[in-house]
């Protein structure tokens, strides 16, 4: 029997579509390339307990996938580089049941009103395709609210003076603030900034049958061992509880088959390596902003905007050293405080833009964070006689505090995802090739806000500070580490009302295919300076409600 | 008795690890943590069933809960292919060479240890350090594995009895205990 919808990808976008559609009475089958370590294989309405506080498994051994040996990507800065300069791991979001929701540390801010109307409010930028979204914040607000209740978000309404309006409070109060963030927030306030408790999809109290977070410290890049992180397990277990959802893990869709204006089915390769086909009524694609355009291109689809405008959030990383403190960032959530100030225009940012020859600059959300895990810290400590004592002094792990600004990337037609001409994955399919270079806007914004953030760390008492970025740049050209660390991948299948310049319509439906909907961050028109998860969940929810003819609770 | 290395290579490996992470004035080094054993179990992961690639979850038993880390995950066909490529190399097998030949860790270690010299374990420390400095690419790989073997979970064969964590005053994995709100927010 043909399911009402085939959903490709089980991350936050696909999970949301599955939950909304099954609630509306649809049957769905979810095809996921990766393994299932999220849900009990014998009862998909219950969690599995495969995640752990294990650095080797999660940081060194690709437990959440993709393994770059069998599912690599290719990378280059620009077409001038030739075919590629690197093959391996590039912006890898987990390939596993639950997708990026599994390894995310759960910060789920909403966008603000102006993020949806950048062209109208701010105006154009040379070389960038800045546009308004065909959706407004007001239209999306009920879906944001539903998403926050569904995945369980802890936060404090009113804590962020720049926040968009909201129809109700957060479902949970914020969790325990990290010691370092208490100090850095006070310093930021003394410098006139506005830090607030990060809206976080980790339970501060028991919620919806899942426990409260016990502060183990293994959030970002780890799955939650106790399932206090709600995204996307809350959505998937609800979908499976309806009895109308089926999961096919370790199953890679290789092609969407089309006939005229309709998708008729998908070809897929299962765990046995055999290719099979499945008929489709509706196809929902939620592979993320790299794998989604790859699949559309593998399916032979063509559009001038397909695969273009890749955005990743140009990260500004500002570090301060505190010789007399022990900041213990390994205790508690990965990030408990953030601030929006770098996205708000003021005289200083206007002057920095003018000096850079730009009409305006926008930074991004600033995260208050600490150092890394021990096996990572050790890699930065010299080998030899002083190794052990250097580790015990822990100048990198315990005595550093860090601001990471998730800088808004502008949409450039030259930053793209396409198919590698030569590199294949283990199934024989061409892999995604990423062509990405930050633009002048990103560098100017990074430099300006980086200096401000260095000042905050000095205010906090740092004996030295430094300011770097990912990808690394020298501010004269791109440096030696051009591959961005950001896991926020955005753009590539942009949304719009005009079929000539956008791939999908305001409901996420492809302009040229009536029954194919894109339900992930690839549809974003601009990248804002916030993590994309809650917004892509809200958009996926809106698209699914539209398909089913339902409205949010 | 190493599962992968010859006794002679294992002696070289132990000596090299000890130079990268020496025992020093009460600080445990690679020798106390059995870092070489970690590397031996990685290269010999397929001597076990299931292969010792991914430890189980959600707890190790060190902070309560069940001792689940010792139950290693079974690998799917595709994971096994990936890890055999990484450890054994492609060995001319077409199913491992879809993007060309892959040199495995076993070969990299065999060559790297050979380059340090058959007499490496016998020469003095200054000479050992000189040879390590001269073999930078291999030393970087080895050092990365030493970091995992010194500070990773003991179930992978290194960080014996948590000596790497204990010296730093760290707990390692903490489920299901976690930390209290006061421990998170206070100095």
Image (cartoon, grey):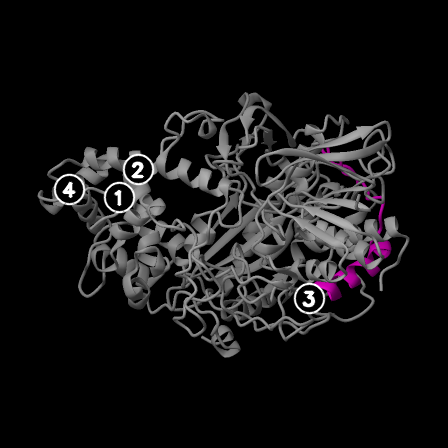
Residue A189: x and y in percent read 61, 67
Q: Which label number is shown at residue A153?
A: 3
In the image, which residues are magenta? A123-152
How far apart are labels 4 and 3 at the CA level?
56 Å
How far apart are labels 1 and 2 at the CA level?
9 Å
Q: Chain of mark 1?
A: B
Please, what secondary structure does the residue beneath circle 4 have?
helix
How far apart are labels 4 and 1 at the CA level?
12 Å
Q: Chain of mark 2?
A: B
How far apart are labels 1 and 3 at the CA level?
48 Å
Q: Which label number is shown at residue B8?
A: 4
**Closer to viewer: mark 3 or mark 2:** 2
Q: Which residue is mark 1?
A: B4
Question: Is the residue at mark 4 from the same chain as the one at mark 2?
Answer: yes
Residue A258: x and y in percent read 80, 29
Q: Which label number is shown at residue B106?
A: 2
Q: Is residue A129 left or right of residue A105?
A: right
């Amino acid at each position: 029997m043909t399911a009402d919808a085939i959903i490709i990808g089980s991350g936050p976008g696909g999970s949301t579509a599955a939950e909304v559609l099954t609630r509306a009475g649809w049957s769905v089958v979810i095809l996921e390339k990766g393994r299932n370590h999220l849900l009990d294989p014998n009862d998909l309405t219950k969690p599995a307990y495969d995640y752990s506080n294990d650095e080797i498994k999660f940081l060194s051994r690709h437990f959440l996938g993709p393994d770059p040996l069998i599912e690599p990507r290719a990378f280059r800065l620009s077409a001038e580089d030739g075919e590629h300069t690197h093959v391996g791991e590039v912006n890898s979001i987990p390939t596993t049941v639950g997708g990026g929701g599994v390894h995310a540390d759960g910060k789920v801010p909403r966008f603000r009103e102006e993020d949806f109307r950048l062209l109208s409010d701010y105006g154009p930028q040379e070389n960038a395709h800045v546009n308004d979204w065909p959706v407004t914040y007001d239209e999306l607000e009920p879906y944001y609210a539903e998403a926050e209740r569904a995945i369980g978000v802890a936060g404090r309404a009113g804590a962020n003076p720049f926040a968009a309006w909201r129809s109700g409070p957060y479902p949970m109060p914020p969790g325990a603030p990290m010691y370092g963030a208490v100090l850095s927030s006070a310093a930021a306030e003394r410098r006139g900034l506005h830090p607030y408790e990060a809206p976080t999809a980790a339970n501060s109290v028991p919620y919806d049958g899942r426990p409260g977070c016990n502060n183990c410290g293994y959030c970002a890049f780890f799955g939650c061992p106790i399932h206090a992180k709600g995204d996307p397990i809350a959505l998937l277990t609800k979908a499976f509880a309806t009895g109308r959802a089926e999961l096919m893990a370790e199953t890679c869709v290789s092609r969407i088959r089309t006939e005229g204006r309709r998708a008729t089915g998908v070809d897929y390769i299962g765990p046995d390596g055999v290719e099979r086909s499945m008929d489709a009524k509706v196809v929902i694609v939620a592979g993320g902003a790299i794998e989604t355009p790859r699949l559309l291109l593998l399916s032979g689809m063509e559009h001038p905007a397909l695969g273009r405008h890749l955005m990743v959030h140009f990260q500004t990383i500002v570090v301060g050293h505190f010789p007399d403190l022990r900041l213990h960032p390994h205790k508690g959530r990965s990030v408990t405080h953030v601030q929006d100030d770098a996205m708000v225009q003021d005289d200083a940012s206007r002057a920095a833009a003018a000096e850079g020859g730009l009409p305006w600059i926008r930074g991004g959300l600033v995260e208050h964070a600490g150092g890394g895990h021990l096996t990572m810290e050790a890699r930065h400590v010299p080998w030899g006689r002083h190794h052990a004592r250097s580790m015990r002094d822990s100048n990198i792990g315990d005595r550093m505090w860090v601001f990471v600004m998730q800088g808004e990337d502008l949409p450039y037609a030259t930053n793209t995802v396409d198919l590698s001409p030569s590199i294949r994955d283990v199934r024989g399919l061409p892999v995604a090739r990423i062509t990405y270079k930050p633009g002048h806007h990103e560098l100017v914004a990074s430099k300006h806000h980086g200096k401000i953030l260095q000042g905050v760390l000095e205010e906090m008492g740092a004996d030295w500070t430094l300011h770097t970025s990912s990808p690394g740049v020298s501010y004269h050209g791109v440096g030696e580490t051009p591959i961005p660390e950001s896991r926020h991948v955005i753009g590539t299948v942009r949304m719009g009302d005009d079929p000539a310049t956008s791939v999908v319509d305001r409901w996420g439906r492809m302009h040229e295919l009536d029954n194919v909907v894109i339900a992930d961050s690839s549809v974003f028109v601009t990248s804002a300076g916030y993590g994309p998860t809650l917004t892509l969940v809200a958009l996926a929810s809106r698209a699914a409600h539209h398909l089913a003819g339902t409205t949010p609770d | 008795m190493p599962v992968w290395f010859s006794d002679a290579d294992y002696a070289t490996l132990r000596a090299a690890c000890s130079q990268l992470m020496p025992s020093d004035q009460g600080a445990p080094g690679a020798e106390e943590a059995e870092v070489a054993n970690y590397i031996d179990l990685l290269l010999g992961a397929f001597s076990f069933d299931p292969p010792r690639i991914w430890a189980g979850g959600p707890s190790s038993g060190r902070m309560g809960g069940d001792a689940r880390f010792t139950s290693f995950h079974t690998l799917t066909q595709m994971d096994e292919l990936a890890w055999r490529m990484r450890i054994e190399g492609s060995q001319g097998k077409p199913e491992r060479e879809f993007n060309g030949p892959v040199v495995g860790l076993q070969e990299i270690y065999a060559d790297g240890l050979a380059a340090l010299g058959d007499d490496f374990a016998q020469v003095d420390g200054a000479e050992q350090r000189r040879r390590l400095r001269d073999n930078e690419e291999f030393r970087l790989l080895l050092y990365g594995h030493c970091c995992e073997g010194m500070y990773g979970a003991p179930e992978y064969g290194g960080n014996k009895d948590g000596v790497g964590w204990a010296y730093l005053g760290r707990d390692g994995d903490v489920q299901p205990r976690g930390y209290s709100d006061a421990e998170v927010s206070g100095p």
